[in-house]
Amino acid sequence: MRNLWVVTKKEFFGMVKTKGFVIGIFLGPLILGAFMFLPAFLARKSKEPQQRMAIIDQTGWLYNKLDSVLVDTLPGGERAYILSQVPYQLATLKQEEEQLRGRILKKELDGYLFIPAGIDTGTPPVYYTRSAGNVVTQNRLENRMHDLVVARRLEKQGVTVGNLKSLLSDVEIELRQVTEKGTTKTSFFTVYLTSFFLVILLFTTVLGYGQHLARSIVEEKNTRIIEVLTSSATPFQLLMGKTIGLGAAALSGVLAMFFLGFLFGAPLVRMLEMENIKNVFNPLLLVNFVVYLLLGYFFFMSIFTILGAISNSDQEVQSMVAPIVWAMVLPMMIGFLVAQNPNAGWITVLSLIPFFTPTLMVMRISYLPPSWPELLASYAIMFLSILAMGWLAAKIFRVGILMYGKRPTLPELVRWLRHR
């Protein structure tokens, strides 16, 4: 036990005393928080420029109505759109349009709108602009003209349109999640970001510490330090000491990031009016996140231990990491399907396969917690998988750390497993 404690302490303090670990604790919440809050923050703070728009109106009635309803304002209070009607003659229409396109290229106009005479019978208007990505302006024009044209059609049918806007106003649903403790206000966007945040944190922690473990084994092999270590401690003590020491460092880092995130993230949540996120970070999710983080850590650490023991260089380790990355990325690729139906049969089966269990179960709990039998089954499967993979890793580790030269073949690995 003393040797195990010495190795564990060495790995733990060797990791937490590095500048990268300390910087990562502060940068981690910043980077992940940026993924969650930056889009909403930028959307609120971005300054929309004033748009100058010319309009050729063949209907004779739509321009004035559009000018009266397109009254969006900028943060400073000025109108977002400055409209100007262009008089035209049918004989010179093409020349007028050519001149307007020239003014757009000279940046005298941001765009011009051509409204055909048959707009209320289905002929679409055309908006000419230099920027094809200004979907906000396009949507506003479409929505306002749609309302005006629909009102015009109703008037032609003798329908009163005085209260048309209120009659056709959108109906928005406020989402409330029902739990055993009552109901909580939530939104899909908030739950999706929370799930994404936790899965990314789990993914980067396991992958980062796993690669560090594999590379440290390769380095100790190449520098022959491993021979000195094995003279003082058994291979099993070395393996457990490395795994537990790095695991303690990983857990400390994650808890520190959570603490800093809650400490500095609360004012940002209030400023962006995202209080719903407090309902998503519930105790069941947080406790299970830590549980699956540890289970996933010990499972994948066994695999990274094998990679380090059978490799002779960092390049060999890197070439074999890809399948592990794919296994951990797959749940993120199907994240939207998990959100739609987290308890679907195929998702339940997939979430009980150890390679996918940590990330998929965290995602499922974020959207709709599975039943306790499913949770307990996933704990049991992960625990048994860790024991099996740990046994495999220990067998390969005790021989592989003393083997140099070429990478072992599969028959050689089988002989290592049979070695007593």
Image: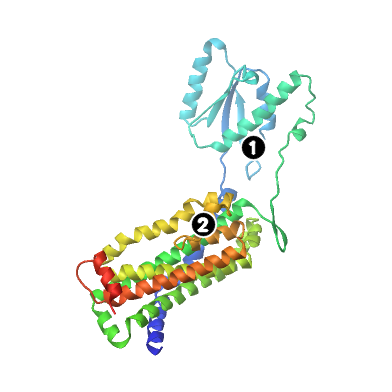
Type of amino acid at the residue the image marks with label 1: Arg
Q: Is residue 89 above or below residue 177?
A: above
Q: Quadrant of the N terminus?
A: bottom left
Query: Which structural element holds mark 1?
Result: loop
Residue at the outermost bottom position: 2
Q: Earlier in the sequence, mark 2 or mark 1?
A: 1
Q: Is residue 2 left or right of residue 96?
A: left
Q: Is residue 364 left or right of residue 386?
A: right
Q: Quadrant of the C terminus?
A: bottom left
The one of 200 and 293 positioned closer to us in this rendering: 293
Residue at the outermost left position: 405
Residue position for label 2:
349
Q: Position of residue 104 (x, y in %)?
A: 49, 28
Residue 155: which quarter of the image?
A: top right
Q: Position of residue 303 (x, y in %)?
A: 37, 67
Residue position for label 1:
79
Name the image colouring.
Answer: rainbow
Type of amino acid at the residue the image marks with label 2: Val
